[in-house]
Amino acid sequence: MGVTEIHAATATLDIFHRLEKEGFGELHLKVDSTTGLHAIVAIHSTKRGPALGGCRFIHYDSSEEAIVDALRLAKGMSYKAAVSNLPLGGGKAVIMKPLHLNNRPGLFKAFGRFVQDLGGRYITALDSGTVLDDMDIISEITPYVASKTNDGDPSPYTAQGTFRGLQATVKYHFKKENLNGLHVAIQGVGAVGYLLARHLHEVGATLSVSDIDKDAVLRCQQEFGATIVEPHQIHAIDCDVLAPCALGATLNDDTIPAIKAKIIAGCANNQLAREHHGQVLRDRHIIYAPDYVINAGGLIHAATRYLHLSDDKAAQHIEGIYDIIYTICERADKLNQPTSVIANHIAEERLK
């Protein structure tokens, strides 16, 4: 049994409407009956360069859910690359994780052939559910891979960019560079959240942390003297900065009224449950660092490795997260608009 590729021509009218409405260029689906591969690649834009975006490998309840996830994430990658001023477009791959996986290398080789067939318009990378070994397997089939083992873990770069973005919001709101004594509540202390906690501890911040992983919070308690808070309570504690670093959609109708922090600055993707929540935060005089701007360090690292740019150039781009976050805060007050809207406007200007 062979491989079948299905392009967006088979998608429903609703999908076409969404593609046109959100400015998408391409949507590709691929099925490999031999390995069980069911993969989607959404390419939002290639106006600034080839579309770079990670490959997500998780369970989905339906193919429609997987397609919507790929579309949403691809558009976010376009905006993230544009705001970060990288010569790249935005795309995303989603592989629907089967209930029983018998041949993981074979599945990722099949996905590598899918990426190769797209001729360089899409560059894949690490994302939820994939590991560097998967990227190495894909790279045996295609050169269009931006995060391999020898490129290193992107987490430290995401954490560094988030830390600098957080510093920018503190500078803007509290008018100070020094974070000593600042109380930061970190919601999720996995790979990036833990590293952010370490950065903050090193400059004297007071930390409260939550995570469903008990070992992760105990580690922060032991190493940084962090206070452990239950996951369902972390958003509501009395603190200066709330740093969402776990799942998305944590800023919603239920949580926002309880937030006491003056600043929200964390690395989680898709923090706003709905677009209008950016305005809700502004109405409550809470500064929100747009997620796809502040967490761009990992993308910058992957992009500079793929483009063979120097470490100095990568560091310069990551350092630029401070400036763009500060600029977004300034523009939001000047124009009386949510920071999320300002970030989108900057990205859209650059995509034009």
Image (spheres, rainbow, N blue to C red):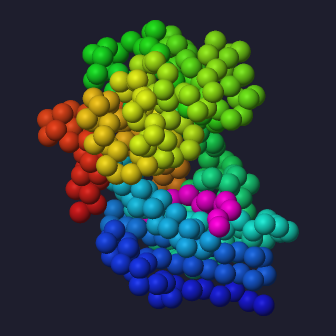
Residue 303 rendering spot, x and y as whole percentages: 48, 52
Q: Look at the image and say whether residue 59 sits in the magenta stretch.
A: yes
When the figure is inspected, residue 334 is found, relative to residue 77, above or below; the finding is above
When the figure is inspected, residue 136 is found, relative to residue 279, above or below; the finding is below
Q: Nearer the viewer, residue 144 or 205?
A: 205
Q: Quadrant of the C terminus?
A: bottom left
Residue 20 rendering spot, x and y as whole percentages: 33, 76
When the figure is inspected, residue 252 is found, relative to residue 61, above or below; the finding is above
Whether residue 227 can be seen here: yes
Q: Which residues are magenta?
A: 51-61
Residue 246 rendering spot, x and y as whole percentages: 57, 40
Residue 10 rendering spot, x and y as whole percentages: 51, 88
Horizontally, residue 178 falls left or right of residue 131, namely left
Horizontally, residue 134 falls left or right of residue 205, namely right
In the displayed orientation, state which residue is furthest to the right. 102
Q: Residue at x 43, y 49 (%)?
A: 273
Q: Quadrant of the N terminus?
A: bottom right
Q: Look at the image and say whether residue 321 sits in the magenta stretch.
A: no
In the displayed orientation, state which residue is furthest to the left. 334
